[in-house]
Structures are given as C-alpha cells and as structure tokens.
Image (spheres, rainbow, N blue to C red):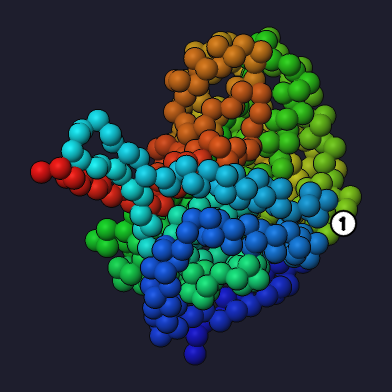
Amino acid sequence: MSEVIKLISPVDGSVYAERPALEEAAVEKVISSARAAQHAWAATPISERVACCLRALEALKAMNDEVVPELAWQMGRPIRYGGEMGGTIERTEYCASVADEALADIERTDKPGFKRFLRREALGIVMVIAPWNYPFMTAINTIMPALMAGNVIVLKHAAQTLLVGERLAKAFEIAGLPQGVFQNIVLTHGGTEKLLGSGVIDHVNFTGSVAGGRAIEKALAGTFATLGLELGGKDPAYVRSDADLDYAVANLVDGAFYNAGQCCCGIERVYVHENLYDRFVDGFVDLTKQYKLGNPLDEATTLGPMAQSRFAAWVREQTQEALRKGAKALVDTSAFAEDKEGTPYLAPQVLVDVNHQMSVMREESFGPVVGIMKVKDDAEALQFMNDSPYGLTASIWTEDVDAAADLGDKIETGTVFMNRCDYLDPALVWTGVKDTGKGAALSEIGFHNLTRPKSFHLRVEH
C-alpha cells in the first residue's frame, strides 16, 4: 500500500487534496518513458520545441481563473493578487525569445583548414523539485528552458502545492507535448532520495531550505548528476541618506510582507541611514498597520495565512527571542483579530533596537517580520549586509547610481537591486552565493546550466 500525500489547506486546516505516492515500479516506468522520449525530443527543431512551450503557456493562461482560488486554498496567497500568471508569461516568453541565440553553435573561424565549433547538448532527464511559495514561477524557471533545450522533465512538486504539478502536466498535454517529455510525479521524501541516488537522473534543480539542499546533495553523491540549488535567504535593504523616502517605504513594506513574507527574495532586514531613520520607521510602521489579515479568498484580504502553522510558529519564536534580547515591536498585533497562536494566521511585525546577535537578523524568517537598524554610513551598512550566511539579493535605495554600483560590487549576493526589490528579471541570471546555493536560472546562462558543451574539431584540409 503506497503512502498518501495530504495537502492541508492553511485557510481552514482541512485536507484540500490527497494523492498516493508512486511506488518503485511506477517510478521506474516514469524514468523509462522519459529516457525513451528524450532523444527524439532533442532531435526536434528548436522552433518546434519553443512553439510547444508557448502553447502550454496559452493553456495555463486559460486556466488562471480556476488556478487563483486554487492557489489560495493550497498555500494562502490572497486572490486579490491574481496568482502568478504575469511572471509565468514574462519568463516563458523571454526564454522563447533567446532560445535560438542561447543554444546556437559558437563558431571558431581563426584556424584555416579546420571547422571548429562548440555546441550545446541537452543533459537528458531533468528533475525539478519545486517549492510551494511560488509554485508556478519557480518551476517554470527550469521547466521552460530545459524543454526548449531538448531535455525531458520529471517534476516532483511540494506536497503543499500538489495540484500545481497536475495543472502543468495538463497544460503540456493540451500543447501536444510528446508522451514522456513532461511527467508530474508524487513522491515521499524517502522515495525522492531513492530516485536521486539511483543514478538515472541527469540534472536536478531544487528550490527550498538549506537542510533540503544538503539532503539533495547527499542523495545524489556519487551519481555525478549536475545540480542547481536555490536555498535560504536573508535579503537586506539599505536606505541611503539621499533616498526618496516615501518611495523606499512603500516598496520595502511590500517587499517585506507580500505573500506573507514567504518570498525567496523578500526583504527580511533593513538598514537605514541615521538621517532618515526616524521618518523611515514611522512611515514603514504606518503602512504596515494598514494590512488586512484574513481569509485569502476574501477580496479585501491583503495578507493571507502562512502556508503552515509550523512556519508561523518559527516566526513567532524568532520575534519573541528578539524581544527577550531587547528589541522593540512597533505593531500592536491585537489589532489583527485573525492572528491566533497555533494557527498560520500571523500579523505583520516591525522590530527596532535589533542587532546581529538576534536570530531575526541572521537566520531566515520567511514570514511577515522585519528588523530595522540605524547605520551611520555606507561602510557600516555594507558590514551588516554581508554579515549573513546567505546571499540571494540585496537592494540599495539611493539617487546615486554610481554609489549603488560601487556598493553592489562589495556586497556578497547574487543580485544587486537599486530602488526596487523582490523581483526576478528573466533577462538577468538568477543565482546566489554562500548558503543560498549554487547554479543559475534565467537569462542565456540558465540555458547553459541545462545543457552540456560539446566541441567539434574537424580537419577539412589534410
């Protein structure tokens, strides 16, 4: 009897969906089908592979009215924000626009008598282990370029968003993708580790926790599969003395609390120049207090529940630890009636008088809490921004482009923003440093990480 994977809705604690995990024989059939399909798919012209992915995108767009409330039930994002279709469209269409160039042969013509070029070949079977927080967009980051490059996909989605994998599979079925090229599977953690250790997967892309990334690496040890990891983050913002104050406040509040703070590149800590600090904090708190915490199926709700009660419990624990160590909470959570201990409903919180001996300023929160510290200059801000085991994004709020670029060179991070945050530009590579992981997605480099280089050295005159 196979184990049943249950999706517990954060809306009301009910079982929203359940699916049986695949047993070993069924997994073997999936892999056999994928391997059988891969060579023919890789031999299909790029234009046809791209066209098929664009047809799948159209199929997803047609589902969006159903998907938005489905996402609210699965992971708690308010329906007022309309799901993830905008980012899914932008990333897929960008991949389609650069696929030819990214996968084109690179000719070397400087040596008479030889035909020499580099070619990018598909890796084979790509396994995507996708997270629940942005379940469509994070999966699409790998799925679309991998398919366009000639790989086949095995998708194992998070239990919290089981139905997303089924939606994607249906979209590719509607698009006419050949059998075996895209397969959605349901697995236990043990089943996933066994599949990874079997040596039949050529590349794995995992988005999740640092502990999860270590488990993936351990499971893959000795298989020589390539691996992309996007793991934890503690993304900082620095508000310089010349920043547009109102603009910085509005965007950083949104960057901290959108999706209940459950964003890979959400703002988790803010450093503000002493000249702006008091006004910034006042504005930040005033705007934070305007959130409406509640049922994500209600159009008036601007802050839904966290995906699971245990995630909210961790943020509550971090906040209490900070308060015990001298931090001050500036939001009266009693004004948020839905905020109840033991539930995933958690009010937004702003902490001051914080320091780097507190977990909330160093360890990932992944929830609606942010600490704000006063700094005297760029050098002090830089020291604090780099005092973290993570490095995904960092944002600088200033009117001085040269200063932002100079600071950006010194920040240990994958992406430097100026006057924006919490966004993935599909034309730029998405990557991290330190415990945030390794590998890269998006841009032409994303294609390169889903292919292998092959050299052709042909003597044509002898």
Comparing 123 with 141, the one in front is 123
Q: In which quarter of the view is residue 252 placed? A: top right
Comparing 379 with 158, the one in front is 158
Location of the C terminus (image quadrant)? top left
Q: Residue at x 42, y 37 (%)?
A: 433
Q: Position of residue 215 (x, y in %)?
A: 38, 59
The residue lying furthest to the right in this view is 300
The reply, left or right, for residue 279 in relation to residue 352 is right
Q: Residue at x 18, y 38 (%)?
A: 113
The reply, left or right, for residue 203 in relation to residue 147 is left
Q: Which residue is mark 1?
A: 298
Q: Position of residue 360 (x, y in %)?
A: 57, 37
How busy is the neighbourhood of tag 1: few (under 14 within 10 Å), some, or many (20 plus)? some
From the viewer's perspective, is residue 267 above or below residue 32? above
Comparing 386 with 137, the one in front is 137
From the viewer's perspective, is residue 243 above or below residue 437? above
Q: Is residue 161 visible?
A: no
Q: Position of residue 153 (x, y in %)?
A: 48, 65
Q: Residue at x 28, y 36 (%)?
A: 108
From the viewer's perspective, is residue 354 above or below residue 297? above
The residue lying furthest to the bottom in this view is 1
The reply, left or right, for residue 195 in relation to residue 267 is left
Instruction: Say what secondary structure mark 1 lies in.
Output: loop
Q: In which quarter of the view is residue 55 placed? A: bottom right
The residue lying furthest to the front in this view is 461
Comparing 67 with 75, the one in front is 67
Q: Position of residue 278 (x, y in %)?
A: 73, 16
Q: Is residue 123 visible?
A: yes
Residue type, mark 1 in image: Asp
Q: Residue at x 74, y 25 (%)?
A: 249
